[in-house]
Amino acid sequence: MAHPHSTLITRIGELVTNDSVSLACSGPLASSSSPGASGGPGFAAITAWTGPAARAPAADSIIDADGRAVLPGFVDSHAHLVFAGERSAEFAARMAGLPYQAGGILTTVAATRAATDVALRANLRRLAAEMLRQGTTTFECKSGYGLTVADEKRGLMLAAEVTPEVTFLGAHVVPPEFAGDVTGYVDLVCGPMLDACAPHARWVDVFCEDGAFGAEEAAAVLAAGRAAGLVPRVHANQLGPGPGVRVAAEAGAASADHCTFLSDADIDVLTSTPVVATLLPGAEFGTRQLFPDARRLLDTGATVALATDCNPGSSFTSSMPFCVALAVRDMRMTTQEAVWAATAGGAAALRRLDVGRLGAGARADLILLDAPSHAYLAYRPGVPQIAAVWQAGRLAAGSPLSSP
């Protein structure tokens, strides 16, 4: 009997499922190659089933992959999409030699506060659509460019229109009206701002860094968020060595994000706790910093995720394929490790078991590459290779019958 509204993708050249790999560790890809490209039967995939084409169940429609690869949809676990304005001049200045500083965030804060809901929504939806076309089927979205009670609340409400993975980041930086009064601003974040924002978020985040919030302030924000029912995540160790990873572990955070400057003690924490190390190579590309040492993390057994950090200041990219290519080239990840981190790794960072893999019990989010192997994501960087994207079993972007 055919599955209702089901689509069968057959003659798949390489099928990446991640289904035999625990989402709690950075294992190799669960993938198989077949002679599908040369006319053989290949593999097949249907909403809740993957396997040899000869055993494929009946379906309402059939798509011939003609030897192309099928992967789980990308899971982008770190993005800042609710903002107004742009900062290309700042980027150009960095490329000319000026150092990156966290204070540039305030430029976006001013623009975001001045923007209408209509303008913020339009930009948010444009970026979400851009992500989908590039294979991202699940993404997280933070507030953090309002930094008032009203602006943080509206940012979260807008984010919730496009994703359930919404993060309250009132503790992004200290806004100008609280200059010199970090304690006063933390009290606002932990009090009236959290009260207004918690009903609209799943996560609470803090930028634990010199120029933003120290260990004590970050711990206070995360503890207040936990008490309000939110799960912690942390911007940690991006601009230099610091306490962020330790703060994340002590708070029971799902992830420590950036992890660019890590001590041996930080590595020990990330390998001995469930905290996922989410690496954001787009930020290093956009700030000309050293890339995180992913090889060191992987070789010691840490769980690694990749995400875009899409934001208008340090990493204005929405492309997970680009981040996969950077991870392979500049962070010494294998192609298999990078794709796992961009799919199952992101799912682990969001504590999701229904995405980042293909198989029974998983949401039918998948990508058809216009290429025979997952390796092409790094092998042909900058080239559009996402032929089609299915989200929850329905074609959401592209065309399975032609190249993008």
Image (spheres, rainbow, N blue to C red):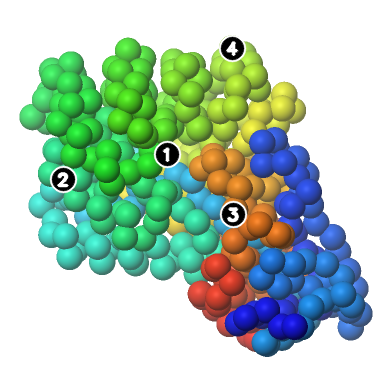
Precedes in sequence: disc 3 or disc 1: 1
- The quarter holding residue 266 reads top right
| Residue that carries the numbered disc 3 in the rendered image | 355
Q: Is residue 229 visible?
A: yes
User: Label 1 amino acid?
Assistant: Thr
Q: Nearer the viewer, mark 2 or mark 4?
A: 2
Cβ atoms at labels 1 and 4 below 8 Å apart: no
User: Label 3 amino acid?
Assistant: Val
How many neighbours does mark 1 have within 10 angstroms: few (below 14), some (14-19), or many (20 or more)? many
- What secondary structure is marked by label 4? helix
Q: CA distance from mark 2 to mark 3?
A: 31 Å
Q: CA distance from mark 1 to mark 4?
A: 26 Å
Q: Is residue 95 visible?
A: no
Precedes in sequence: disc 2 or disc 4: 2
User: Label 4 amino acid?
Assistant: Ala
Q: Position of residue 118 (x, y in %)?
A: 17, 65
Precedes in sequence: disc 2 or disc 1: 2
Q: Quadrant of the N terminus?
A: bottom right
- What secondary structure is marked by label 3? loop
Q: Position of residue 213 (x, y in %)?
A: 30, 21
306 or 77, nearer to the observer: 77
| Residue that carries the numbered disc 1 in the rendered image | 287
Residue shown at the point (55%, 75%) measured from the top left: 394
Q: Nearer the viewer, mark 1 or mark 4?
A: 4
- What secondary structure is marked by label 1? helix
* Relative to 329, residue 58 above or below: below
| Residue that carries the numbered disc 2 in the rendered image | 151
- What secondary structure is marked by label 2? helix
Q: Residue 265, labelled with which disc?
A: 4
